[in-house]
Image (cartoon, rainbow, N blue to C red):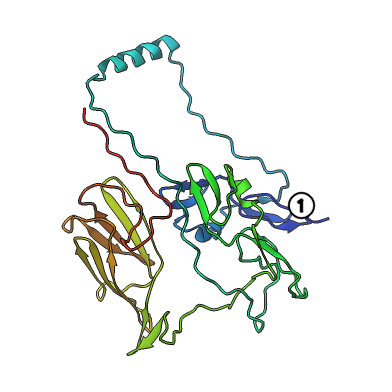
């Protein structure tokens, strides 16, 4: 009888207990917009990329996976009286005339932006691989070779984007929230579609017809948009624009007081070009701001002119999504 492995990153059905299992032994880690697993080093920015991180450990399948033990730091053999005395002495050194801060206004729970549109139907001319999992979030149904496709499949899924806020986890399309990542992965979908979506169109949308999207002219491909993300520190906003093979010699990045002018050209056989002006949410110090071109993206460090928190990167974006609230420590 086939059983389903509960190891994180595996989730396969198996009947041979000696079959090799590839999985993540550690818990998921979400920190300052980055996502990954505690057991290995890859860190990504989007939830879909997080789900595609390859497992780092091999072992045997299991139906009773145990969560990792919570790490505890040993206090040592210091006597309790010595600890109390040390704490009292440190508290006595703290000044009592520190300026007080006005309480922060309560922030509403952020909602994630809507997910990018995708094909609602599989391309009938393309073959679906055996064991291919439905691409819709929360469905987890897999394709079995030769199965009949019809509108009776009933794909139950989440059309919204994942939301992680103050320890709670859920989707923007419904109100259910849980605390544990395993519970989040098992949240039952809130929308039903007639058919599963295993492969979609099976191709990237790289051709446009003048009504949006991408077009080719003069031997290069013009990109209207690229995926971007950002996180921030008290003084800096770090923004990433994801585009592979950027030509460092041909690309230009210009900083303005409240804008970012980009002209990015790739080194592909048919070069791609992304040319735009990004209106920034806040003013920046142009002299202190910097950028670097990596293998898969342009990373820009925008030095804040006033040190305030940015709820969004662009001034024309709605103030939604995960917000990193930045505070200022009082003077001593």
- Image x and y of residue 230, in percent: 36, 57
Residue displayed at 21% across by 27% down: 332
Along the horizontal axis of the image, is 255 left or right of 82?
Answer: left
Hey, which residue is sitting farthest left in the picture? 287
Along the horizontal axis of the image, is 254 left or right of 8?
Answer: left
Residue displayed at 70% across by 67% down: 131
The N terminus, quarter of image: bottom right
- Image x and y of residue 320, in percent: 42, 55
Q: Is residue 24 above or below residue 218?
A: above
Q: Is residue 328 above or below residue 88?
A: below
Hey, which residue is sitting farthest right in the picture? 1
The answer to whether residue 58 is visible is no
Label 1 neighbour load within 10 Å: few <14, some 14-19, many 20+:
few
- Image x and y of residue 68, in percent: 59, 39
Q: Please tell me whether mark 1 sits on a helix, a strand or a loop.
A: loop
Residue identifier under label 1:
17
The foreground one among 201 and 259 is 259
- Image x and y of residue 198, in percent: 64, 71
The answer to whether residue 35 is visible is yes
The foreground one among 121 and 245 is 121
Hey, which residue is sitting farthest top in the picture? 81
């Amino acid at each position: 009888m086939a059983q389903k492995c509960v190891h994180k990153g595996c989730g396969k059905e198996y009947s041979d207990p000696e079959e090799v299992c590839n999985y993540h032994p550690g818990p998921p880690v979400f920190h300052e917009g980055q996502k990954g697993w505690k057991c290995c080093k890859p860190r990504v920015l989007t939830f879909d990329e997080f789900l595609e991180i390859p497992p780092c450990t091999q072992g045997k399948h299991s139906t009773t996976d145990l969560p990792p033990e919570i790490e505890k730091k040993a206090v040592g053999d210091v006597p309790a009286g010595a600890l109390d005395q040390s704490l009292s002495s440190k508290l006595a050194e703290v000044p009592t005339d520190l300026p007080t801060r006005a309480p922060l206004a309560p922030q509403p729970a952020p909602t994630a932006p809507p997910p990018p549109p995708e094909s609602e139907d599989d391309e009938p001319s393309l073959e679906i691989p055996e064991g291919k999992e439905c691409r819709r979030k929360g469905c987890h149904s897999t394709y079995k070779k030769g199965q009949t496709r019809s509108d009776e499949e009933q794909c139950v899924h989440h059309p919204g984007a994942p939301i992680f806020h103050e320890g709670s986890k859920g989707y923007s399309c419904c109100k259910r929230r849980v605390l544990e990542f395993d519970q989040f992965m098992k949240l039952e979908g809130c929308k039903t579609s007639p058919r599963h979506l295993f492969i979609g169109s099976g191709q990237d949308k790289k051709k446009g017809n003048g009504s949006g999207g991408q077009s080719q002219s003069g031997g290069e491909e013009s990109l209207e948009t690229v995926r971007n993300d950002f996180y921030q520190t008290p003084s800096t906003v770090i923004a990433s624009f994801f585009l592979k093979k950027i030509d460092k010699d041909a690309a230009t990045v210009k900083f303005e007081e409240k804008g970012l002018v980009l002209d990015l050209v790739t080194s592909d056989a048919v070069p791609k070009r992304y040319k735009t002006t990004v209106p920034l949410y806040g003013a920046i110090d142009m002299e202190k701001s910097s950028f670097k071109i990596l293998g898969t993206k342009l990373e820009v460090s925008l030095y804040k002119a006033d040190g305030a928190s940015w709820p969004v990167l662009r001034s024309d974006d709605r103030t939604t999504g995960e917000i990193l609230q930045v505070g200022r420590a009082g003077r001593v």
